[in-house]
Structures are given as C-alpha cells and as structure tokens.
Image: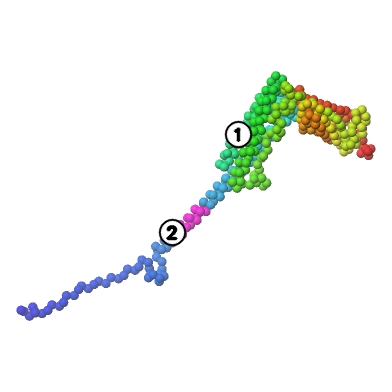
Amino acid sequence: MSFFDEVDEPPSQPPPTETRGRRPSARGGAAGHGGPPTDQQAIQRRRLVAVGGIIVVIILLALLIHSCDVSAQKSALQTYAQQVNNTIGSSSSLGSQLFADMSGKHKGCSGAQSLYQCVTGLETSAQSQYDSVLHLSVPGSMHQAQADLVTTMKMRRDGLQKIAGSVEQAFTASTAPSAVQQIAAGMSYLYGSDVLYKGYALPEIVAALHAGGVAVGGSGVSVNGSQFVTDLTWLNADSIASQLGVALPGVPKPTAPTITVVAVGTNTMVPGVTNHVAASPPPTFTLTLTNAGRAAVFDVACTITVHNAVSGGQNVGGSGSVSELTPGQTATCPVTLNTSPATHLYDVTATVTVGANLLKSSNEETFPVQFLAPGQAG
C-alpha cells in the first residue's frame, strides 16, 4: 500500500449554514412596547370615524324628515278642520234663511211663486257647498269623517230640493195636504243631516285632531257645532202649514190672541179715556195676550203705533213677539217705543198678528194717550 493510501482523509464538514436576518414585525415593536402605529391602523381608524359620521348624519336626517312629516300632517289636519268649520257655518246660515223665508219674515219671499224662488236659491247654494266638500283635500285619518260629512251635505241639498219642489203646491187647497207632507219629509232630511254631522262626523274630526296632536278649541283649531234645524216644530206638518199660512183639512185655523190688557208699568190703558204716560225715556207698553182659539199659534207679532207722531223723521212705534201660545195660554209681550214722542195727545194702537197668507189673523185695540214731559209725569 502506498504511502498516500495510508493517510487518513480529513473528516468532511457540513456546509456552512447561511444566517438570515429577521424580518421586522408588521405590527411594529414587540407587544406592549408601544411602537409607532402603522399605515394600516390609521386607515382602519379613519374608516371607523367615517362610518360613525355617516350613521350620525342618517339619524339626523331621519329625525328631520320625521319632524317635517309630523308638521305636514298637523298642517293638513288644521286646514281640513278649518275648511269644514267654514262650510258648516255657511250651511247653517242657509237654515236660518230658510225658516225666515217660510215663516214670512222676508217680504220678498211671501207668496207661492216668491217663496219657491227663494228656496230654489237656497238649494243652489247647498249644491255648491256639497260640490266644495267633494273636492276637499282629506288627510288619511279624516276619511271616515269626510264620508259622513259628504252625506251630511248631500242630505241638506236633497232636503231643500224636496221643499222647493212642494212649496207652490202648498198654497193650493187641493194639493196643500200632500205638499205639506212633502215639505215635512224634506225637513226630516235636514234634521237627519244634523244628527249625522253632530253625532258622527264632528266627533270623528275632533278625535282625529287630538290623535294628530292638534289642539281643539280655545287657542287651537275651531270646530263648528251649529245645526241646520234649530226648531223641531218644523218637522210637524200642522206647524209647517201654520207657518206658511195655508189650511189643511180637519186642522183648526190659528187665530190671533185676544188682547186682554195693555199697560205701561202699573198704569193700565183704557179705551175711550185719555191715558197719561211719560214720554221720556221711551215708554214700554206691555200687552197681555190670551189664545182663545183651538190651534196653537207661533211667532205672534206685537206692535204699538203712535198715530201721526213723528220724531226727527222717524215714525214713533215699536214691536215685540211671543214665540208660541197654546190654546188657553196667556203670555205678556213687552213693546218699547223706538223714540220718545212729543208731548202731545195721540191715538195709540196695540196690534197682535199671527199667520200669513190665507191664515193671517190679527186683533187690535186703540186708546188715546197724552204723553207728558218728565216734570209733568206723576
């Protein structure tokens, strides 16, 4: 073996291991050492702030929209209630005019043809009111009230239509009974409209206003509780005939009450004898009336006329009334002169009148009166 074969080879060494440096942590320094934040953390924080701001803006917008919606609803309720208030007021005034026309208080509406024209004019106004109600802007909570209001105004229009279609026939003897019954039917429509409005529509309007946070009455929204028919005697055919001054078969005709006493204070006026009355202040003559007839009388008119007495271009006299006198009933009717008469001797007439047209009836009594200056009285 050669020399070189005997020599041991040096032991083999493992290849040197390459030492790699550590990568810096993505989170910065060691935990708990408070190293500076990285860009990723700042981005996340900015995102959270932005999201919070958006949420706040959304909440504020929602509150603002809700507030505007509530305000708009309140405004709509107030507007609707005010329109209803005005319409019912105008409608009720038609009722006052109707009953004044039919009881002969308006001279331009007396007689068959004139009264027909007057009632027809009221019917036209009722139609206009009905049409205006149909076109109201109705808040959602008022739908039931609106439905009842529409029916109310329709009943008023229809009631006036029935009355207008029968008033002329009421003044003819042969058609008077059926015509007066039709007028009474028309009156029932008008009264039914009052029941519907005051019993249903009006409470529904008030409830909706309260639910919407709208105050009612006082400094709040006004609601109109007036009604069309204020005197229930207009529902009775006999009373209607009496007011119109037409006769119905088998119904006693109303006659003017008897004047039993005319007095100024405790001083009773005596016909055919000079009566002494202080001229100033304008005296009040009190008429005592008795219904000696077989029928009730309504709207008894009492007047005092001082004949040939004129003061400052004004005729001297006065008027009063009694709403109703049943058979056998007695009542007083005070009448104050419209001005003081001159100190002179005059004839004074007291008159009572009931009815109209063919049923018109009156009684009167005349007596001489010496009007005295204040120093002379007593």
The question of residue 52 being in magenta is answered with yes
Check the picture and name the quadrant holding the N terminus: bottom left
The question of residue 138 being in magenta is answered with no
Q: Position of residue 95 (x, y in %)?
A: 69, 33
What kind of residue is marked 2?
Arg
Q: Position of residue 194 (x, y in %)?
A: 65, 35
Q: Secondary structure at mark 1?
A: helix
Residue highlighted by disc 1 = 151
**In the rendered image of this protein, does residue 308 appear above or below residue 60?**
above
* Residue 124 makes an appearance in the image: no
Query: Secondary structure of the magenta portion, mostly?
Result: helix
Foreground tag (1 vs 2): 1
Dot 1 crowding, Cα within 10 Å, few <14, some 14–19, many 20+ = some
Residue highlighted by disc 2 = 47
Q: How many marks?
A: 2
Q: Secondary structure at mark 2?
A: helix
**In the rendered image of this protein, does residue 206 appear above or below residue 277?**
below
* Left or right of 7 in this view: 76: right
